[in-house]
Amino acid sequence: MGRGKIEVKKIQDKKNRVVTFCKRRSGLMKKAQELSVLCDAQVGLIIFSQTGKLSHFSSSRDMGEIIQTYYECVGCCSESPHKFQPPYKSEEVARLMQKIHVEEKMVRTLMGEELSSLSLSDLDQLECQVQLGMNRIRMRKNQLVEDLQRRGNELQRDNDALHKMIFEGGRYVERIVKNKCGIPSTAVATNPWQQNFMQPLQG
């Protein structure tokens, strides 16, 4: 018997909703990239999370080109081109396109691409940003190394104490065995953990 159709509805648990969004978003972005590569298609994907965070994929270098092509295509293919109304206000579209363009340019700049248009002041500012990021990475790395070293020292001290306890316990057992077997011993068998209680009373 075939599997019944699963109803698609909003996930009520906020934590599960966020996890599902992240997983589905990654899968959707991957499928969009595969479609653009396999079929040599122009693909533009824009996603806004519940908190308004933007995620996007563009098969071209500029998402604005795909959005502009979309509007031109819909406007030309509709029966009444002059009646075509974009789903968003032109000011909002322009703002989103500008935001996407700025973010794409920032990513390429941080990756060391397209530096020819930057002035000396821009390069100095970029260098400071990169250096600040490197300092944060270095501080975090040093913190992790110190934590690992401290944990290693603690484990070493615990290990040394355990070995000492085992060694002293073994010597005590050996003396007890010798005494029971009648083997003479110059040392009196003394439990190292009870030696403070076996001292003779001073009178």
Image (cartoon, rainbow, N blue to C red):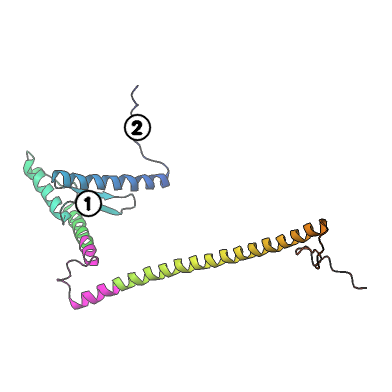
Residue 40 point in image, percent of width and height: 13, 46
Count of residue discs: 2
Residue 18 point in image, percent of width and height: 38, 48
Considering depth in this image, is 169 or 63 the residue closer to the camera?
A: 169
Q: Is residue 110 magenta?
A: yes
| Relative horizontal placement of residue 148, taking residue 180 as reference (left or right) | left
**Residue appearing at x 83%, y 58% in the figure:** 182
Q: Which residues are magenta?
A: 104-128
**Residue appearing at x 16%, y 44% in the figure:** 38
Based on the displayed image, in which of its 4 quarters is residue 157 positioned? bottom right
**Residue appearing at x 21%, y 58% in the figure:** 100
| Relative horizontal placement of residue 23, taking residue 60 as reference (left or right) | right
- The correct choice, above or below, for 25 with respect to 179 in the image is above
Q: Quadrant of the C terminus?
A: bottom right
- Circle 2: element type: loop
As drawn, the residue found furthest toward the top would be: 1
- The correct choice, above or below, for 165 with respect to 33 in the image is below
Please name the amino acid that badge 2 sits on.
Glu
Considering depth in this image, is 129 or 87 the residue closer to the camera?
A: 129
**Residue appearing at x 15%, y 53% in the figure:** 60
Mark 2, other Cα within 10 Å: few <14 / some 14–19 / many ≥20: few
> What is the magenta segment's predominant secondary structure?
helix
Q: Is residue 190 magenta?
A: no
| Relative horizontal placement of residue 157, taking residue 8 as reference (left or right) | right
| Relative horizontal placement of residue 77, taking residue 134 as reference (left or right) | left
> Which circle marks residue 57 in the picture?
1
Residue corresponding to mark 2: 7
